Amino acid sequence: MTVTEYKILTPEQRSQFLSHGWVKIPQGVPRENIARFTENVWIRLGYDPEDKETWTKEKIHMPRHREIVTSEFMPKAWGAMCELLGGEDRIDKTLFESCGDSLIVNLGSKEWENANIHPRDLGNWHIDGDWFMHYLDSGEQGLTVIVLFNDIKAKAGGTYIAPDGIANVVKWLHDHPEGASSFEQDPDGSRSICGIQSCSEFVELTGQAGDVILLHPFMPHSASKNHLRIPRFITNPPVTLKEPLNLNRPNPEDYSPVEKKILNTLGVSSLPNWHITTERKRFTPRTRAAKDAMIIEEVERMKAHASKTGIPVESMHINGPILYQVVVG
Protein backbone atom coordinates (compact mmCIF):
# COMPACT_ATOMS: atom_id res chain seq x y z
CA MET A 1 0.00 0.00 0.00
CA THR A 2 1.40 3.40 -0.96
CA VAL A 3 0.80 6.65 0.91
CA THR A 4 -1.52 7.97 -1.82
CA GLU A 5 -3.99 5.14 -1.08
CA TYR A 6 -4.66 6.31 2.48
CA LYS A 7 -8.07 7.94 2.67
CA ILE A 8 -8.90 7.73 6.38
CA LEU A 9 -5.67 7.72 8.36
CA THR A 10 -3.71 10.97 8.39
CA PRO A 11 0.10 10.98 8.23
CA GLU A 12 0.09 11.82 11.96
CA GLN A 13 -2.14 8.84 12.76
CA ARG A 14 0.01 6.48 10.72
CA SER A 15 3.11 7.78 12.46
CA GLN A 16 1.49 7.28 15.86
CA PHE A 17 0.56 3.69 15.01
CA LEU A 18 4.09 2.88 13.88
CA SER A 19 5.59 4.56 16.94
CA HIS A 20 3.14 3.55 19.66
CA GLY A 21 1.02 0.74 18.20
CA TRP A 22 -2.41 2.34 18.49
CA VAL A 23 -4.64 5.03 17.03
CA LYS A 24 -8.06 6.46 17.86
CA ILE A 25 -10.68 6.96 15.14
CA PRO A 26 -13.03 9.65 16.48
CA GLN A 27 -16.69 8.90 15.76
CA GLY A 28 -15.75 5.75 13.88
CA VAL A 29 -19.28 4.39 14.46
CA PRO A 30 -22.43 6.36 13.54
CA ARG A 31 -24.43 7.44 16.59
CA GLU A 32 -27.54 5.57 15.47
CA ASN A 33 -25.67 2.26 15.54
CA ILE A 34 -24.38 3.00 19.04
CA ALA A 35 -27.93 3.78 20.18
CA ARG A 36 -29.38 0.64 18.60
CA PHE A 37 -27.00 -1.72 20.37
CA THR A 38 -27.39 -0.11 23.79
CA GLU A 39 -31.14 0.55 23.87
CA ASN A 40 -32.01 -2.63 25.79
CA VAL A 41 -28.79 -3.29 27.66
CA TRP A 42 -30.34 -2.89 31.15
CA ILE A 43 -33.19 -5.22 30.25
CA ARG A 44 -30.68 -7.83 29.16
CA LEU A 45 -28.57 -7.35 32.29
CA GLY A 46 -31.57 -7.47 34.61
CA TYR A 47 -30.19 -4.52 36.59
CA ASP A 48 -31.70 -1.18 37.56
CA PRO A 49 -29.50 1.58 36.07
CA GLU A 50 -30.44 3.87 38.98
CA ASP A 51 -29.72 1.36 41.75
CA LYS A 52 -26.12 0.21 42.12
CA GLU A 53 -27.21 -2.34 44.72
CA THR A 54 -28.67 -4.38 41.84
CA TRP A 55 -25.31 -4.46 40.06
CA THR A 56 -24.25 -7.83 41.42
CA LYS A 57 -21.45 -8.42 38.92
CA GLU A 58 -18.54 -6.06 38.33
CA LYS A 59 -17.69 -7.17 34.78
CA ILE A 60 -19.92 -8.94 32.28
CA HIS A 61 -19.11 -10.22 28.78
CA MET A 62 -22.55 -10.18 27.21
CA PRO A 63 -23.46 -12.47 24.28
CA ARG A 64 -24.56 -11.25 20.86
CA HIS A 65 -28.21 -11.00 19.82
CA ARG A 66 -28.04 -8.60 16.86
CA GLU A 67 -25.36 -7.87 14.32
CA ILE A 68 -24.48 -5.60 11.40
CA VAL A 69 -21.79 -6.16 8.76
CA THR A 70 -18.66 -4.43 10.05
CA SER A 71 -18.19 -2.16 7.04
CA GLU A 72 -21.75 -0.89 7.51
CA PHE A 73 -21.68 -0.74 11.30
CA MET A 74 -18.55 1.45 11.43
CA PRO A 75 -17.64 2.62 7.90
CA LYS A 76 -15.04 5.18 8.99
CA ALA A 77 -13.30 2.80 11.38
CA TRP A 78 -13.53 -0.02 8.82
CA GLY A 79 -11.66 2.14 6.31
CA ALA A 80 -8.92 2.75 8.87
CA MET A 81 -8.75 -0.97 9.70
CA CYS A 82 -8.30 -1.81 6.03
CA GLU A 83 -5.48 0.72 5.73
CA LEU A 84 -3.64 -0.65 8.77
CA LEU A 85 -3.93 -4.19 7.41
CA GLY A 86 -2.71 -3.42 3.90
CA GLY A 87 -6.01 -3.23 2.05
CA GLU A 88 -9.52 -4.63 2.19
CA ASP A 89 -8.58 -7.49 -0.12
CA ARG A 90 -6.37 -8.98 2.64
CA ILE A 91 -9.26 -9.29 5.12
CA ASP A 92 -11.26 -12.51 5.45
CA LYS A 93 -14.88 -11.36 5.31
CA THR A 94 -16.22 -14.89 5.77
CA LEU A 95 -15.00 -15.06 9.38
CA PHE A 96 -16.18 -12.51 11.94
CA GLU A 97 -17.76 -10.47 9.16
CA SER A 98 -20.04 -8.49 11.46
CA CYS A 99 -20.21 -6.45 14.66
CA GLY A 100 -22.83 -7.18 17.28
CA ASP A 101 -24.25 -6.13 20.61
CA SER A 102 -21.94 -8.44 22.59
CA LEU A 103 -21.14 -5.63 24.99
CA ILE A 104 -18.34 -5.87 27.51
CA VAL A 105 -19.62 -4.18 30.66
CA ASN A 106 -17.61 -2.74 33.54
CA LEU A 107 -19.81 -1.50 36.40
CA GLY A 108 -17.14 -1.27 39.07
CA SER A 109 -17.71 -2.14 42.72
CA LYS A 110 -17.60 -0.48 46.13
CA GLU A 111 -14.23 -2.10 46.72
CA TRP A 112 -12.53 0.09 44.12
CA GLU A 113 -14.28 3.43 44.65
CA ASN A 114 -11.50 4.95 46.77
CA ALA A 115 -8.64 2.68 45.75
CA ASN A 116 -5.51 3.66 43.84
CA ILE A 117 -4.03 0.93 41.65
CA HIS A 118 -0.96 1.21 39.47
CA PRO A 119 -1.71 -0.13 35.96
CA ARG A 120 1.16 -2.58 36.32
CA ASP A 121 -0.75 -4.26 39.16
CA LEU A 122 -4.08 -4.76 37.37
CA GLY A 123 -3.31 -8.44 36.97
CA ASN A 124 -5.03 -9.38 33.70
CA TRP A 125 -2.60 -8.14 31.06
CA HIS A 126 -2.87 -10.11 27.82
CA ILE A 127 -3.15 -9.95 24.06
CA ASP A 128 -6.35 -11.09 22.38
CA GLY A 129 -7.01 -14.38 20.65
CA ASP A 130 -8.14 -17.32 22.79
CA TRP A 131 -9.14 -19.38 19.75
CA PHE A 132 -5.88 -19.96 17.86
CA MET A 133 -2.18 -20.67 18.22
CA HIS A 134 -0.21 -17.42 18.27
CA TYR A 135 2.84 -16.93 16.08
CA LEU A 136 4.80 -13.87 15.02
CA ASP A 137 2.95 -13.92 11.69
CA SER A 138 -0.54 -14.93 12.88
CA GLY A 139 -3.31 -13.29 10.91
CA GLU A 140 -6.30 -14.46 12.96
CA GLN A 141 -6.19 -11.35 15.16
CA GLY A 142 -5.34 -8.72 12.56
CA LEU A 143 -6.03 -5.87 14.98
CA THR A 144 -7.42 -5.48 18.45
CA VAL A 145 -10.51 -3.29 18.00
CA ILE A 146 -12.19 -1.42 20.86
CA VAL A 147 -15.53 0.26 20.18
CA LEU A 148 -16.75 2.76 22.79
CA PHE A 149 -20.53 2.64 23.34
CA ASN A 150 -20.57 5.39 25.94
CA ASP A 151 -18.35 8.31 26.96
CA ILE A 152 -15.45 6.97 29.00
CA LYS A 153 -13.48 9.28 31.26
CA ALA A 154 -10.40 8.63 33.37
CA LYS A 155 -10.91 6.20 36.29
CA ALA A 156 -14.19 4.96 34.78
CA GLY A 157 -13.14 1.52 33.57
CA GLY A 158 -11.33 2.34 30.34
CA THR A 159 -8.91 -0.22 28.90
CA TYR A 160 -5.24 0.24 29.79
CA ILE A 161 -2.55 -0.46 27.21
CA ALA A 162 1.24 -0.80 27.49
CA PRO A 163 2.75 0.35 24.18
CA ASP A 164 6.32 -0.52 25.20
CA GLY A 165 5.13 -4.07 25.91
CA ILE A 166 4.70 -4.74 22.18
CA ALA A 167 8.46 -5.24 21.97
CA ASN A 168 8.28 -7.96 24.64
CA VAL A 169 5.59 -9.88 22.74
CA VAL A 170 7.34 -9.49 19.39
CA LYS A 171 10.66 -10.69 20.78
CA TRP A 172 9.08 -13.69 22.50
CA LEU A 173 7.20 -14.77 19.38
CA HIS A 174 10.27 -14.27 17.23
CA ASP A 175 12.33 -16.44 19.58
CA HIS A 176 9.59 -19.09 19.87
CA PRO A 177 8.51 -20.15 16.38
CA GLU A 178 6.66 -23.05 18.02
CA GLY A 179 4.05 -20.48 19.11
CA ALA A 180 1.76 -20.37 22.12
CA SER A 181 -1.94 -20.86 22.76
CA SER A 182 -2.38 -18.27 25.51
CA PHE A 183 -0.90 -14.90 26.38
CA GLU A 184 -2.53 -14.19 29.68
CA GLN A 185 -0.33 -13.05 32.53
CA ASP A 186 0.55 -15.35 35.39
CA PRO A 187 -1.42 -14.39 38.52
CA ASP A 188 1.62 -12.83 40.19
CA GLY A 189 2.73 -11.08 37.00
CA SER A 190 6.22 -12.54 37.28
CA ARG A 191 6.46 -14.48 34.04
CA SER A 192 4.11 -12.68 31.69
CA ILE A 193 5.08 -13.00 28.05
CA CYS A 194 3.82 -9.43 27.79
CA GLY A 195 6.58 -8.47 30.22
CA ILE A 196 4.41 -5.97 32.07
CA GLN A 197 6.72 -5.74 35.07
CA SER A 198 9.39 -4.29 32.77
CA CYS A 199 7.03 -1.79 31.12
CA SER A 200 7.00 1.91 31.96
CA GLU A 201 4.53 3.30 29.38
CA PHE A 202 0.86 2.93 30.32
CA VAL A 203 -2.07 4.64 28.59
CA GLU A 204 -5.68 4.72 29.83
CA LEU A 205 -7.98 4.68 26.80
CA THR A 206 -10.75 7.26 27.15
CA GLY A 207 -13.07 8.82 24.60
CA GLN A 208 -16.60 9.46 23.46
CA ALA A 209 -19.39 7.13 22.40
CA GLY A 210 -18.72 6.10 18.80
CA ASP A 211 -14.94 6.38 19.01
CA VAL A 212 -13.02 3.32 17.86
CA ILE A 213 -9.51 2.55 19.09
CA LEU A 214 -7.35 0.31 16.93
CA LEU A 215 -4.47 -1.54 18.57
CA HIS A 216 -1.65 -3.58 17.11
CA PRO A 217 -2.53 -7.25 17.72
CA PHE A 218 0.55 -7.58 19.96
CA MET A 219 -0.45 -4.67 22.20
CA PRO A 220 -0.66 -5.81 25.85
CA HIS A 221 -3.86 -4.50 27.40
CA SER A 222 -5.90 -4.92 30.54
CA ALA A 223 -9.33 -4.09 31.89
CA SER A 224 -9.10 -1.40 34.56
CA LYS A 225 -11.07 -0.76 37.72
CA ASN A 226 -14.13 1.43 37.34
CA HIS A 227 -13.51 3.67 40.34
CA LEU A 228 -16.24 6.16 39.38
CA ARG A 229 -18.83 3.42 38.77
CA ILE A 230 -20.06 5.09 35.61
CA PRO A 231 -21.32 2.10 33.57
CA ARG A 232 -18.83 1.39 30.79
CA PHE A 233 -19.85 -0.38 27.59
CA ILE A 234 -17.46 -1.46 24.82
CA THR A 235 -17.15 -4.23 22.24
CA ASN A 236 -14.07 -5.97 20.96
CA PRO A 237 -14.87 -7.34 17.46
CA PRO A 238 -12.12 -9.40 15.77
CA VAL A 239 -10.85 -8.81 12.26
CA THR A 240 -9.08 -11.72 10.56
CA LEU A 241 -6.78 -11.87 7.55
CA LYS A 242 -7.08 -14.37 4.71
CA GLU A 243 -3.42 -15.28 5.06
CA PRO A 244 -0.76 -14.98 7.77
CA LEU A 245 1.22 -11.76 7.94
CA ASN A 246 4.00 -11.63 5.36
CA LEU A 247 7.25 -10.47 6.94
CA ASN A 248 9.32 -11.02 3.81
CA ARG A 249 7.61 -9.15 0.98
CA PRO A 250 9.60 -8.54 -2.24
CA ASN A 251 8.35 -4.95 -2.41
CA PRO A 252 8.85 -3.04 0.88
CA GLU A 253 5.97 -0.72 -0.02
CA ASP A 254 3.58 -3.69 0.23
CA TYR A 255 4.09 -4.13 3.97
CA SER A 256 1.05 -3.15 5.99
CA PRO A 257 1.55 -0.85 9.00
CA VAL A 258 0.88 -3.88 11.24
CA GLU A 259 3.72 -5.77 9.53
CA LYS A 260 6.00 -2.71 9.54
CA LYS A 261 5.54 -2.29 13.28
CA ILE A 262 6.79 -5.84 13.86
CA LEU A 263 9.81 -5.43 11.59
CA ASN A 264 10.66 -2.00 13.01
CA THR A 265 10.48 -3.41 16.53
CA LEU A 266 12.98 -6.10 15.59
CA GLY A 267 15.17 -3.56 13.77
CA VAL A 268 15.06 -5.43 10.45
CA SER A 269 13.64 -4.79 6.99
CA SER A 270 12.48 -8.38 6.47
CA LEU A 271 12.59 -11.88 7.97
CA PRO A 272 13.48 -14.22 5.10
CA ASN A 273 14.62 -17.08 7.32
CA TRP A 274 11.93 -17.04 10.01
CA HIS A 275 9.30 -19.81 9.85
CA ILE A 276 6.86 -21.41 12.27
CA THR A 277 7.79 -24.88 13.51
CA THR A 278 4.41 -26.29 14.58
CA GLU A 279 1.00 -26.66 12.96
CA ARG A 280 -1.38 -23.71 12.95
CA LYS A 281 -4.47 -24.50 15.01
CA ARG A 282 -7.83 -22.93 15.81
CA PHE A 283 -10.12 -24.05 18.61
CA THR A 284 -13.32 -23.19 20.46
CA PRO A 285 -12.94 -20.19 22.83
CA ARG A 286 -13.08 -21.17 26.49
CA THR A 287 -15.74 -18.48 27.07
CA ARG A 288 -18.27 -20.14 24.74
CA ALA A 289 -20.17 -22.22 27.34
CA ALA A 290 -20.65 -19.30 29.74
CA LYS A 291 -22.03 -17.12 26.97
CA ASP A 292 -24.49 -19.80 25.86
CA ALA A 293 -25.90 -19.90 29.39
CA MET A 294 -26.15 -16.11 29.45
CA ILE A 295 -28.02 -16.11 26.12
CA ILE A 296 -30.86 -18.12 27.66
CA GLU A 297 -31.10 -15.78 30.64
CA GLU A 298 -31.09 -12.63 28.50
CA VAL A 299 -33.71 -13.94 26.06
CA GLU A 300 -36.03 -14.74 28.98
CA ARG A 301 -35.62 -11.21 30.33
CA MET A 302 -36.35 -9.71 26.91
CA LYS A 303 -39.43 -11.93 26.51
CA ALA A 304 -40.71 -10.83 29.91
CA HIS A 305 -40.16 -7.20 28.95
CA ALA A 306 -41.92 -7.77 25.63
CA SER A 307 -44.97 -9.23 27.36
CA LYS A 308 -45.27 -6.06 29.45
CA THR A 309 -44.51 -3.47 26.79
CA GLY A 310 -45.35 -5.08 23.46
CA ILE A 311 -41.82 -4.31 22.22
CA PRO A 312 -40.73 -7.32 20.14
CA VAL A 313 -37.65 -9.31 21.06
CA GLU A 314 -34.76 -8.83 18.65
CA SER A 315 -32.43 -11.79 18.96
CA MET A 316 -30.92 -14.37 16.64
CA HIS A 317 -31.25 -16.74 19.62
CA ILE A 318 -35.01 -16.42 20.10
CA ASN A 319 -35.36 -20.21 19.77
CA GLY A 320 -32.22 -21.04 21.73
CA PRO A 321 -28.46 -20.44 21.46
CA ILE A 322 -27.02 -20.69 17.96
CA LEU A 323 -23.91 -22.84 17.98
CA TYR A 324 -20.82 -21.37 16.32
CA GLN A 325 -17.84 -23.40 15.24
CA VAL A 326 -14.39 -22.04 14.52
CA VAL A 327 -13.19 -23.50 11.22
CA VAL A 328 -9.75 -25.01 11.56
CA GLY A 329 -7.46 -23.63 8.89
Image: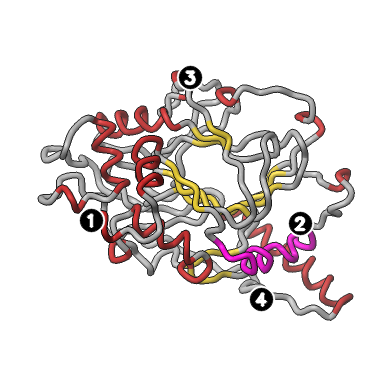
Kindly identify the amino acid type of the residue bearing the numbered disc 3: Gln
Residue occupying image coordinates x 37% and y 62%: 327
Kindly identify the amino acid type of the residue bearing the numbered disc 4: Asn
Q: Eyeballing the image, is 322 above or below 136?
A: below
The number of callouts visible is 4
Mark 3 and mark 1 in contact? Answer it, CB < 8 Å.
no
For marks 3 and 1, give the CA distance.
38 Å
Residue occupying image coordinates x 43% and y 24%: 195
For marks 3 and 4, give the CA distance.
47 Å
Mark 4 and mark 1 in contact? Answer it, CB < 8 Å.
no
Mark with earlier residue (4, 1)? 1
State the SS at label 4.
loop
Mark with earlier residue (2, 1)? 1
For the C terminus, which image quadrant? bottom left
Residue 197 - label: 3
Please name whichever residue, 298 or 201, is drawn nearer the observer in this view of the structure.
201
Mark with earlier residue (3, 2)? 2
Residue occupying image coordinates x 50% and y 26%: 186
Circle 4 is placed at which residue position?
A: 319
Circle 1 is placed at which residue position?
A: 2
Q: Which residues are magenta?
A: 29-44
Q: Position of residue 252 (x, y in %)?
A: 15, 47
Q: Residues within 10 Å of mark 1 (few under 14, many from 20)?
A: few
Circle 2 is placed at which residue position?
A: 45
The verdict on residue 42 being magenta is yes
Residue occupying image coordinates x 27% and y 45%: 259
For marks 3 and 2, give the CA distance.
35 Å
Kindly identify the amino acid type of the residue bearing the numbered disc 1: Thr
Kindly identify the amino acid type of the residue bearing the numbered disc 2: Leu
Q: Position of residue 89 (x, y in %)?
A: 28, 66
